[in-house]
Structures are given as structure tokens and as C-alpha cells.
Image (spheres, coloured by chain):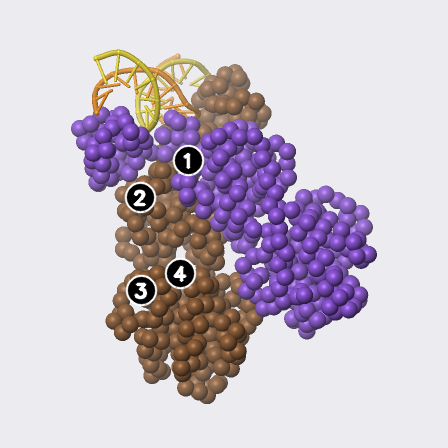
Chain colours: A brown, B purple, C orange, D yellow
DNA sequence: TTGAAAGCGTTACCAT
DNA sequence: ATGGTAACGCTTTCAA
């Protein structure tokens, strides 16, 4: 087996012209079907499986590779159910369209990405980028679709966080008033509300900060529901959790559930947080939903499986990925005008907060 | 902003030589630190963020990109907790070493991958590839590390499936005999034991087939434990589940738990299956662990969180990914001799099958 | 530090 | 269908 085989050598071996071999791979219409068949099968036998990507993309200015840049570290993203679902949707569409998937993390210092940003024909940016990677990518002038990040200049795909949060809070509140006939004492377990690496409660001045769009929208939705029913939620009933993982979430839940008077409603900004809260409640001997109602956000698969199953807001993460990928592919090939897509959310009522 | 900027133009703009700019990016030692600083910052200002990957890798024959090829579809892999954990470990190491991650799926028909296989400097192959993609990749002559797939020619990273399965089965069996003082009536919910797309029981002749190495090893482990305690498990007590997802798993569990006499031990070849079985048991009003012991395999995060939590075999998926990635990087730079790494498993005893 | 030039594998265009 | 050739952007070598 020859280690390196290129078009020229293959053409020589097969006794045809170099252009013809190239055409066999790229433009079926430029030669007879028979010859094409022969070239394809023979060259495969020789160990040549198609044009070298680097050379081809250097020449053509396009690679067939799509870059997905994640605001958090790659490694964390794989462990996050919501990011995984997004990637699931994205990869579905990319595979269907024979595009490759290059994963980039947006939290790297600088030119740490070796220079891989130059390869993809377009980018999906998930979350809000911190460093200068965003700027670098934008300057490439290639199509970009941003997901879960509001912005003017690029295509965006978002969900209606505010409406979703409002709906689930309203459900919990009215449920408490009507079914359980008791006063509402709600706490909020919030995700990334302020810029701090620690679990902590908000201060009065934090309540109006616009740190991370998504969480602020959800908070706004909760607050609208509260206002609607004349419920009061003090800043010190709102926890900030820096990262969507069980350890931080459990800590916050433990703090929240050991304050007096103890909250009887826990509005959680993610399912991971809510499931952690349910676990802490069980540890503390608090019964759900009699003594405590817990709501989530996202509707990750585990929310339906867990016991008690979780009342939450379905945000269609997989579909979000599909939509983003389709939009990107479309704008790579068609030069369309900037789109801002907003997907609906849906309230999913389950045991942790039943009717 | 100029859309396309290359080394030559940048050099011209900065009034230095093209070689010097190249050196600024690739060989800090070839010029003064001061000049380098200036070039880096100035060129970034101009909108040039480093050499074009296609050109660079064409010239150098190396791209800094690592390909991870998954035997199942990309989209499925993102939904599978074990695959996600592997990717988590892999990406950790790759990021640390400033390598990029290109995802490829191994179940595509043929040259569907556009030709992206030519880009990576090396490959991690996860699972047993079906099509000819494997062959194609092997012919590239680039370093390959195979994970969860036994083979001679390449580096491999595996776990000791047999020992793990034997340990967990022994635990369940002795637990039943000693703690619950009852006879053992065990069924096995197996993953991909035969080549069929449907949930079904094994036939006597299936029991000795070598379809998919991993599952066969686990089956062998279970059988050794059974033999050791003089327990008999007929082929019709062994279910085949074609894919590691809850729907198939629930169906198999339902079948198994409605046979008479009803099994009091369910040995499941994955945690996803075991958690499904636990759910079905609850639906059917079967109490765990009194009436039924369920064991899993993998130790995915949800196994610890679920209620009842799951007795299982920890296979260190994240670490497996790390090890594979390190081995690959090592063999890319050092030309080492073929290694076959086997990671240990560990029995994790929890509520579904307590002491 | 520099300028010049070769060459990585491809595609696209030309005239044949 | 072919053979020839320029160009894609880069790295590397060599002599200056």
C-alpha cells in the first residue's frame, strides 16, 4: 500500500487524465457513467478515497465542514444534557447534508485554536462567548448562526424564555393557592444570574442586572407571574448558581430549603437544578408535592424519567439544533437576509407540581 | 475590513518579510520577542488571526485536528450517556493539547464523508465499525486508537467486561441467597447480543455466538458467576435489545417481568436498560429490592441519582476517553509500539441490590 | 532578519 | 475526454 496517493498518481496509474479523475469525483456530468464507475472503483482499490480535504478546500475556498463553537468548555458541554440535545439536532441535519462537524470551544484564551477557525464554511455559536473568539470568527465574514444569544447582526435562534418561565411559575402559584390552599412562599434557584463563581443569594441591587440574557428573561417571566398574583419574591429568596451541575445546585437547594420560613415552591432555572432540588428535599424529608412544589426548565429526558417526574418547560433543544443547522446551511448556499427565529416553549405538567 | 487577508498581504502592510510573519506565528525563537509582539498584535488588528488551516496543513502534512469516529450515528451518540462521557474525556485531553476535534460517523455508506477523513492527524474509533469507513481510515496510514473494540493491529483501549459482569452477577446472586434467602431466578437483559433489529429472546443456538465482543464478554461474565453458584440461566431467559435506548429496554423489561415464574434478578447490560427495568418494575408494582434485584453496567451519572439508585459496574468512561486521547497523541508524535490497554471495572453497590 | 522560490494536492480554465 | 497550467496560502530552505 502506498502511503500517499494523489490525483496525479492515480491518473497515471489508470491511464487517464488528471482532469478526468478530478471530474469523476466532483462532476459526474463531465464524463461517461461507465468511465466514472471504473475510475471510482479502481482508485478505491489503489487506496485513493477521494480528494485531499486540505488541498480541495484551499483551492475552492470551502471545506464542507461546519464549526460549532460552544461557550463553555467542550468537556463540560458533553456532560450538559441541554447542550448534548442541541448537538444531537445539529448533527442530524449536518449528516443529512453531508457536512462535517468541527467542535470548537469559545472559552479558550486566544489563538489557542491553532487556526482551526479558518476551516469551516460557517459557524453555529451556542451561548454567549466570553473571549475574543467571537470577534475573530465574525471577522472571517462567514455565515454565523447564534443560538441562545440575542444579537442584531447575525442570524439567531432563541426560545421564548420569558413566556416559558411565566407559564410554569403561574402554574405552580395557582396550584398552590387552589389545590393546596396555602400561601405562596416561593424561592428561585437561578442559573448564572450574576457574575460570580459561587453559589449565593442575590442582593437587592442584583435584581435588575442584565448579566446573561437567558437567565434574566426567565427571571423576568417568574416575576411577571408573581406580580400577576400579587406574590412577593425578595432578592434574598433568589439564589445564583454559577454552573448547571448537580453539586452547585444541591448546595443552593440545601440553603434554600433550610431557611425559615421554608419555601413551599422552588422555581428552578434548569432541570438539572430542579432534579437536584428534588433530591435534597427527599434527603431532608420534605414531601413533594404536598410540602414543596418544584419546577424545572428545559425538559431534558431525565425530567420525565425521574421519580417524582418533573414539571418543567419544554424548550425543544433538539429541534433548536436542527433549526439552527438548517438556517446555517441555507445561508451558506443562498445568501438570505438575517433571520431571528424564536421557538415556542411548552409547559409540561408532571408529578412534582401536579394539577 | 478586508474579507480575505493572507500572510503576504499582512507582511506587506507591516513592512516586514513574509518569512518573518510566518515565524512570528510558528517559531518564536526565530525573531526578537519585541518584533514578534508587534507582528502579532498588528496583524490581529488588521483582521488576520493566524495561518489558514487548509494551506498550512497542505504544506505541512499535519492539521492539528483529531478525528473521532463513532460506530453509531452522531446524533444517537450525543444522546447516549456512555458515548457522551467518552467524548468528554477525549475532548479534555485534546483541548489541553490544543488539538481540534472533528466528529465523523462510521455508519455512512461510502465516500459520504466528503473526504474529511483526509484532514485529521489521527483517529479515535469508538465501537465496532460496520461499513468500509474503517478500511479507508486504516489505509491512510495514520495513527489509530480503537476503543471498545478488540483488535490486533491498532492500539486499543478496552475495559474488562467479563470481570465486571461476573462481579455484579455474583453480588446479586449471593445477595439473593444470603440476604433474601430465596432461590435465584435470574433473567438477562442483553444489549446487541445478536444481529436483529428487534427485541427478542435468545434461542439455544444464539448463546454461543460471537456477535459483538463487548456484549459477549459481559454475557460470559454473567454465565461464569451463574456456573460458580450452580445457577442455571436458559437462553429463553436472555433478552436481546438492539439499541441502548429506553423504549426498547422498557419493552424487554416488560416482557421479562411478565413471564412466570417471574425473575427476581434482572442482570442488565447497561444502566440505561437497568433504569428502564426499574421503571417498569414500579409500574407493575414490583418492589425493589425485596421482590426484584436489578443490576446495571456502565455507571452513568443518572445511575447514582435515580431512586432507587442503581447497583452497577463502573467502567470509567471519561477516563477511557482520556486514556485513548493521550495514547493517540503520544503515538502521533512518538511512533510507539502497539499498545493494548485494559481498564479495570469496579462494582458499585447501591439500593437496587444492596448488601 | 530578508527576499526568492519550490512545492503541498487540488480545481478550473484553456485549447485541442 | 485530454493535457497543460495558473492559482489557492502556506512553510521551509538558502544565500545574502
- In the foreground, B248 or B316: B316
Q: Residue at x 58, y 35 (%)?
A: B339
Q: Secondary structure at mark 1?
A: loop
| Image: B114 above or below A37 | below
Q: Residue at x 40, y 83 (%)?
A: A261
According to the picture, the residue beneath numbered tag 4 turns out to be: A243
| Image: B219 above or below A295 | above
Relative horizontal placement of residue A110, taking residue B324 as reference (left or right): left
Relative horizontal placement of residue B115, taking residue A61 as reference (left or right): right
Cα gap from disc 3 to disc 2, whole angstroms: 25 Å
Tell whether label 4 touches label 3 (CB within 8 Å): no
Cα gap from disc 2 to disc 1, whole angstroms: 16 Å
Please state the horizontal and vertical placement of residue A63, each as a whole percent of the image.
Answer: 40, 36
| Image: A287 above or below B200 | below
Quadrant in which the N terminus of chain A is drawn: top right
For residue B108, the mark is: none
Relative horizontal placement of residue B64, taking residue B113 as reference (left or right): left
**Which chain is disc 4 placed on?**
A
**Label 4 crowd bin: few (<14), some (14–19), many (20+), radius 10 Å:** some
According to the picture, the residue beneath numbered tag 3 turns out to be: A194
Q: Secondary structure at mark 2?
A: loop
According to the picture, the residue beneath numbered tag 2 turns out to be: A110
**Which chain is disc 1 placed on?**
B
Amino acid at each position: 500500500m502506498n502511503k500517499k496517493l494523489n490525483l496525479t498518481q492515480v491518473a497515471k496509474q489508470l491511464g487517464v487524465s488528471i482532469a478526468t479523475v478530478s471530474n469523476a469525483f466532483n462532476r459526474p456530468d463531465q464524463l461517461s457513467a461507465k468511465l466514472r464507475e471504473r475510475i471510482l472503483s479502481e482508485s478505491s482499490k489503489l487506496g485513493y478515497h477521494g480528494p485531499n480535504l486540505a488541498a480541495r478546500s484551499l483551492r475552492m475556498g470551502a471545506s464542507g465542514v461546519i464549526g460549532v463553537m460552544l461557550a463553555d468548555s467542550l468537556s463540560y458541554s458533553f456532560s450538559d444534557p441541554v447542550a448534548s440535545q442541541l448537538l444531537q439536532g445539529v448533527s442530524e441535519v449536518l449528516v443529512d447534508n453531508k457536512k462535517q462537524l468541527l467542535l470548537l470551544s469559545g472559552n479558550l484564551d486566544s489563538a489557542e485554536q491553532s487556526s482551526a477557525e479558518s476551516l469551516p464554511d460557517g459557524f453555529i455559536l451556542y451561548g454567549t462567548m466570553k473571549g475574543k473568539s467571537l470577534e475573530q470568527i465574525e471577522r472571517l465574514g462567514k455565515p454565523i448562526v447564534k443560538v441562545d444569544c440575542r444579537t442584531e447582526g447575525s442570524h439567531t435562534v432563541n426560545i421564548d424564555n420569558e413566556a416559558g418561565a411565566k407559564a410554569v411559575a403561574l402554574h405552580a402559584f395557582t396550584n398552590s393557592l387552589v389545590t393546596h390552599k396555602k400561601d405562596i412562599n416561593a424561592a428561585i434557584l437561578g442559573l448564572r444570574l450574576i457574575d460570580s463563581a459561587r453559589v449565593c443569594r442575590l442582593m437587592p441591587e442584583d435584581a435588575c442586572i442584565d448579566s446573561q440574557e437567558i437567565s434574566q428573561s426567565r427571571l423576568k417571566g417568574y416575576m411577571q407571574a408573581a406580580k400577576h398574583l400579587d406574590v412577593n419574591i425578595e432578592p434574598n429568596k433568589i439564589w445564583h448558581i454559577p454552573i448547571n451541575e448537580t453539586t452547585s445546585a444541591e448546595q443552593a437547594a440545601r440553603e434554600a430549603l433550610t431557611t425559615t420560613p421554608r419555601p413551599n415552591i422552588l422555581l428552578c432555572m434548569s432541570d438539572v437544578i430542579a432534579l437536584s432540588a428534588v433530591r435534597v428535599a427527599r434527603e431532608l424529608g420534605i414531601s413533594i408535592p404536598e410540602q414543596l412544589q418544584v419546577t424545572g426548565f428545559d425538559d431534558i429526558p431525565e425530567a420525565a424519567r425521574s421519580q417524582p417526574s418533573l414539571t418543567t418547560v419544554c424548550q425543544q433543544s433538539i429541534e433548536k439544533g436542527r433549526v439552527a443547522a438548517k438556517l446555517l446551511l441555507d445561508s451558506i448556499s443562498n445568501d438570505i437576509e438575517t433571520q431571528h427565529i424564536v421557538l415556542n416553549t411548552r409547559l409540561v405538567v408532571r408529578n412534582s407540581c401536579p394539577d
